[in-house]
Amino acid sequence: MKKQTDKNAVREIKSVKIVGSFISDHFGELWDKSLNDLIKEAVFGVLKNVSKDGDFDPKEIEAVYIANMASGIFNNQLHLNAVVSELFEHFPPSIRVEGACASGSLAMITAQDALNSGRYKTVMVLGVEKMTDFNSNEATKVLSSASDYNFEYGSTFPALYALLAKAHMHKYGTTREQLSAVSVKNHAHALTNSKAHFNKLFTLEQVSQSSMVADPLRLLDCSPVSDGSSAVILSTKDSGKLLDGKTVNYKNKPKIIGMGHAQDFLSLANRKSLTSLNATIKAAKDAFKQAGLTSKDIEVAEVHDCFTIAEILAIEDLGFFKKGTGGQATLDGQTTFGGKVLINPSGGLKACGHPVGATGVKQVAYLAELLENGIKVKTDRSKKIMNFKYALAHNVGGSGATVVVHILEK
Ligand code: COA
């Protein structure tokens, strides 16, 4: 196997284009949609989004990768690779990938590996989770199966991230107000995103005084339990076919130029540090090396903010801010429009929502759309479009045992 630093490997990864992207309309409590509806919506939605001139020819899709964490429990439906494949007349080969909250990005890298090996030239990657038919207690129990069953039995994800928050506050003096600033900013960003679970502004005080979930994390520090799906079409070709036989050119489609995937102990008790996610540091290092970039080149990132402390850890471990300064940087406006680096313009998991299996694919789909179209920002007097050249997606499984980082170029 070639090393990730091998020049050829870099070249091959650079040639993977994101030729279509889709995020379900919208994330949230979707009472009227089943798991199968969300899968269908993503498949047919992404086929529509490849070109303005017509629908993409489904026969171009040589394989489908579907990410999902827990449909066997939430929806009593397993074998999702068969569920998705039968939506195509030609029944493409299909694989389901599971890695807790990182299922989506793991499906992405599984698909990229198949493309880079030359096995396929065009594939679809899809993420889905339908969680809200369970109440929060039941959903919490299902989600906790992504922690270490032997060492962390009985703990919940808010409780595990609360331990990380306490450690960070103790070591670096991170404050309640700084945690709240992450939530305030991401809820504000979600107002620019019509697909977000929440479309409501909160103040620092409202976040700091929302009901306690696991000390110090409160309701408005947590990402919600959401339903949703997302999809991308990846290709190593220069063009593809629409249903009416027309050709669609991929010249201007965003590219994936770097990826990193790293693992750490599942249980917090075994980790070297509680104030960094080492898997983030490692995955980012590989992704930046492949892309030939550093964190200074990244203008926009979707990072895994399942809890407010998770965003602070991410922006430090990805190298955007010095260790221990992520909270203050957020409070100072360095991670919003006009700041040093725009973090979670979609609203992140906190406010756009977190349908677990869909999240990693959604981050890439959202950033691909951002690179293609820019984002409309209101200034004091007018609206302007902000454009970006490089973007980063950071997806975490559980409390940091699995991390995937992708770097995209316009
Ligand atoms: N952020 C903002 N508002 C939220 C919210 C969240 N995370 N979760 C729920 N709400 C809102 C609901 O919309 C509802 O508002 P309304 O009264 O205006 O309709 C209200 O809060 C109560 O909702 P409810 O569903 O009863 O909340 P809950 O107390 O049962 O659940 C949490 C809240 C925080 C426990 C739940 O969202 C949760 O478990 N989040 C973490 C999910 C998780 O661990 N994911 C994996 C990460 S690794």
Image (tube, rainbow, N blue to C red):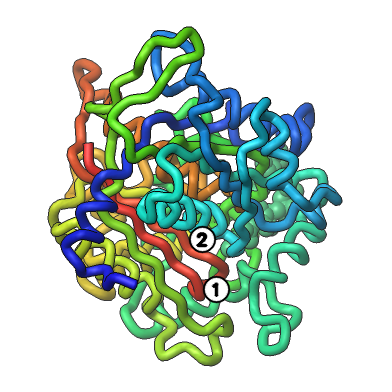
Q: Nearer the viewer, residue 170 or 144?
A: 144
The quarter of the picture where residue 322 lies is bottom left
Residue 289, above or below 43: below
Q: Which disc is residue 327 wearing?
A: none
Residue 33, above or below 302: above
- Residue that appears at 76% across and 51% down: 79
- The answer to whether mark 2 is within 8 Å of ligand 1 is yes
- Residue that appears at 52% across and 43% down: 125
Q: Is disc 2 surrounded by few (<14), some (14 to 19) or many (20+) residues within 10 Å?
A: many
326 lies left or right of 203: left
Who comes first in sequence, dot 2 or dot 1?
Answer: 1
Amino acid at dot 1: Ala
- Residue identified by numbered label 1: 162
Asked whether residue 288 appears in the rendered view, the answer is yes
Q: Are marks 2 and 1 in contact (CB under 8 Å)?
A: yes
Amino acid at dot 2: Phe
Q: Nearer the viewer, residue 269 or 203?
A: 269
The quarter of the picture where residue 142 lies is bottom right
- Residue identified by numbered label 2: 307
Q: Residue 80 appears at what percent x and percent y?
A: 72, 47
Q: Is disc 1 surrounded by few (<14), some (14 to 19) or many (20+) residues within 10 Å?
A: many
Q: Residue 365 appears at what percent x and percent y?
A: 43, 38
